[in-house]
Image (tube, rainbow, N blue to C red):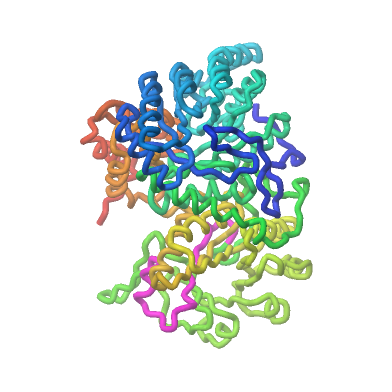
């Protein structure tokens, strides 16, 4: 039942080449308007038990002081919904007024009560009127229409209460909690996510209710990006109102990985002018989410003034499918392109005297006792030395890139390759089976494209100085696709005088936004900051590069954790448990482990994980293999051991030496 979308219906954003915010209707949320001409808002969610008024209020105050413009609080039942009134009153007495949002799953009666108390309710169309049993159901048109009427009966009372009380609503689809009905008809994919929301949105419009925000969340940034794009296109196609979008990657995790994954999904959409409010979901205290969200949003405050023109591109001429992943076809040049995983280049050109121990930062370790090299899973593939000579024999697996004139003087060229300018490339015959051509996005002339079409030894190192970087780089990829050029491309980005955390966020946005669309055969990141030692900056750049490839699922080098950010539904300490599981399993390269505080999204998100660890009661854990329950009601103190035993049973365990 997936609709076939022709290229004429690919228009999901205002422009592919210039930054423009998508124009949406304005939604009033407790006096702080969203959408329209308002700035992109930031928000978060409390993690305390909603029945613990004191702790919830304290969290709200910390969030307000951090800059959260809206605060979401879970209301899984009537009693929590009723306590929202008390929380709101205590906040007001303390001098804090912030729009509160009730987060609803499974319980329409709690939503109807909360809509009379708070400024906004969030409902999940996957479980507001349905239950998930992972069943495949056959529907006729008549039986499916009967299901829609059943949903209407459950949903209309909430709409009418929201209209009466002036309460806003978010219809928030989660990839992990699509109903059996939706998955049976449309599939477990972006189409299913979008249709799940549209069914509810059409009912709301029929009732004349428009105070609505929409979201399409997934723990997989690629799925998340595709779903939001498709949602915008479908609303336009059906002539529905242009509702504001709430952006977020759910269950992103913590630390660097959580920030990279969130930035890849949220940042990709912000680059295209989509998004009116964002929530960065980290498995950390909620106030730590706000600075990350602000850093992402702040890039776009002056983007219109800072960007330089990029050659226009119509959606009819756009060769990149926005709603499904297709890897750009490339030829293999040695270990780059073709069926090879994307490669990582480390930039040591600033070092005046490179030592063997300096390579520890990029995962290569010299062992003097045995006079051998060792490499970990984050071992870079190439090292750029600029005009430096090769100071010692490099470890196996690490190749060298030098500027062309220095390379010419190098006598041992077996694993040393030239980086050439466009002028050098077009005027000089270069005798090497691997040539790196360094060029800006605006240097892709027709003559150069013709030359590239007649060579099979060239890898492009593509960079841009445009403030609207991702769009500029993407436009160059479009030229390569249109000219059928199959040379691999290394995407190069340099960031100067930005903090370590902002470096993570910016790089994940600029490069991740390309990788989720199948663009790029490698990453070359450079980070310079006077406050950060050069070795630390290189180590960070290498870690972020591998993190971006991991989050885009184009190169898996470590264990992946899909962990929710915690909320009042959580049945154990998520941060502590995630750290404990990570400590014992982070050597299991390529294994995906989901750590979920409750069953709301857990089983669904775990369809994309190998194993699941889900709170199912006080002190009780349910363990999953993919989406199948393996063990129920495991005592929490034994659950990590039981999880490891399950991994061992499947032959995926590796003993740490």
Q: Quadrant of residue 435?
A: bottom right
Is 650 above or below relative to 517? Answer: above
Residue placed at 60% from the left, 33% from the top?
27
Instruction: For residue 623, say whether it is visible.
Output: no
Q: What segment is highlighted magenta in the picture?
A: 337-364
Q: Is residue 621 left or right of residue 66?
A: left
Residue placed at 75% from the left, 59% from the top?
311
Residue placed at 44% from the left, 58% from the top?
501
Residue placed at 33% from the left, 29% from the top?
630
- The image shows residue 149 at horizontal and vertical percentages of 60, 13
- The image shows residue 16 at horizontal and vertical percentages of 70, 51
Q: Is residue 247 left or right of residue 499?
A: right
Verify whether residue 339 appears in magenta. yes
Closest to the observer, 457 or 111: 111
> In which quadrant will I find the N terminus?
top right
Closest to the observer, 217 or 208: 208
Is 320 above or below relative to 598? Answer: below
- The image shows residue 235 at horizontal and vertical percentages of 68, 32
Verify whether residue 393 appears in magenta. no
How many discs mark residues in the rendered view? Answer: 0
- The image shows residue 189 at horizontal and vertical percentages of 57, 34
Closest to the observer, 169 or 57: 57
Q: Residue furthest left?
A: 637
> In which quadrant will I find the C terminus?
bottom left
Q: Is residue 434 left or right of residue 310?
A: left
Q: Quadrant of residue 305?
A: bottom right
Instruction: For residue 19, say whether it is visible.
Output: yes
């Amino acid at each position: 039942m997936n609709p076939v979308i022709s290229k004429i219906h690919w228009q999901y954003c205002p422009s592919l080449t210039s930054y423009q915010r998508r124009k949406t209707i304005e939604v009033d949320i407790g006096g702080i308007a969203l959408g329209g001409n308002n700035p992109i808002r930031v928000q978060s969610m409390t993690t305390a038990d909603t029945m613990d008024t004191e702790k919830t209020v304290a969290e709200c105050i910390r969030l307000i002081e951090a800059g959260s413009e809206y605060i979401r609080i879970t209301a899984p039942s009537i009693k929590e919904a009723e306590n929202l009134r008390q929380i709101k009153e205590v906040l007001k007495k303390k001098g804090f007024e912030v729009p509160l949002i009730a987060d609803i799953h499974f319980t329409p009666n709690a939503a109807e009560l909360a809509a009379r108390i708070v400024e906004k309710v969030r409902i999940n169309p996957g479980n507001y009127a349905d239950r998930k049993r992972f069943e495949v159901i056959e529907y006729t048109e008549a039986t499916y229409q009967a299901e829609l009427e059943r949903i209407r009966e459950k949903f209309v009372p909430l709409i009418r209460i929201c209209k009466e009380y002036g309460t806003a609503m978010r219809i928030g689809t989660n990839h992990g909690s699509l109903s059996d009905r939706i998955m049976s008809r449309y599939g477990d994919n972006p189409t299913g996510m979008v249709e799940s929301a549209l069914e509810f949105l059409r009912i709301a419009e029929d009732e004349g209710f428009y105070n609505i925000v929409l979201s399409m969340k997934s723990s997989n940034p690629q799925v998340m990006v595709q779903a939001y794009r498709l949602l915008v296109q479908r609303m336009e196609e059906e002539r529905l109102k242009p509702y504001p979008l709430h952006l977020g990657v759910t269950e992103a995790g913590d630390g660097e990985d959580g920030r990279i994954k969130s930035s890849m999904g949220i940042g990709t959409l912000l680059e295209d002018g989509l998004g009116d409010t964002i929530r960065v979901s980290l498995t950390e205290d909620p106030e730590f989410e706000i600075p990350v969200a602000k850093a992402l949003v702040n890039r776009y405050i002056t983007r219109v003034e800072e960007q330089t023109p990029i050659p226009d591109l119509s959606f009819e001429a756009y060769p990149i499918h926005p709603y499904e992943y297709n890897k750009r076809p490339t030829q293999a040049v040695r270990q780059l392109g073709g069926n090879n995983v994307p490669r990582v280049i480390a930039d040591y050109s600033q070092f005046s005297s490179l030592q063997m121990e300096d390579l520890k930062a990029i995962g290569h370790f010299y062992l003097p006792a045995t006079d051998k090299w060792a490499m970990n899973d984050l071992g870079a593939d190439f090292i750029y030395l600029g005009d430096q000579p090769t100071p010692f024999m490099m470890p196996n697996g690490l190749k060298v890139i030098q500027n062309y004139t220095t390379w010419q003087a190098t006598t041992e060229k077996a694993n040393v390759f030239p980086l050439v300018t466009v002028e050098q490339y077009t005027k000089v015959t270069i005798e090497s089976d691997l040539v790196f051509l360094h060029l800006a996005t605006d240097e892709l002339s027709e003559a150069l494209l013709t030359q590239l079409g007649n060579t099979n030894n060239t890898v492009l190192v593509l960079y841009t100085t445009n403030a609207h970087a991702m769009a500029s780089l993407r436009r160059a990829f479009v030229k390569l696709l249109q000219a059928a050029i199959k040379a691999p491309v290394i995407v190069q980005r340099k960031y100067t005088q930005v903090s370590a955390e902002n470096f993570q966020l910016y790089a994940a946005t600029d490069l991740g936004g390309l990788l989720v669309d199948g663009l790029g055969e490698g990453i070359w990141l450079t980070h310079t900051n006077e406050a950060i030692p050069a070795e630390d900056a290189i180590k960070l750049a290498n870690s972020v590069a591998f993190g971006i490839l991991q989050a885009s699922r184009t190169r898996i080098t470590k264990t992946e954790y899909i962990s929710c950010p915690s909320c009042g539904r959580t049945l154990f300490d998520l941060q502590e448990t995630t750290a404990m599981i990570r400590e014992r399993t982070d050597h299991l390269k390529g294994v995906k482990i989901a750590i979920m505080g409750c069953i709301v999204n857990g089983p669904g998100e775990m369809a994309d994980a190998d194993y699941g660890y889900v709170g199912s009661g006080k002190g009780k854990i349910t363990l999953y293999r993919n989406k199948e329950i393996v063990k129920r009601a495991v005592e929490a103190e034994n659950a990590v051991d039981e999880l490891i035993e399950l991994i061992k049973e499947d032959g995926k365990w590796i003993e740490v030496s």
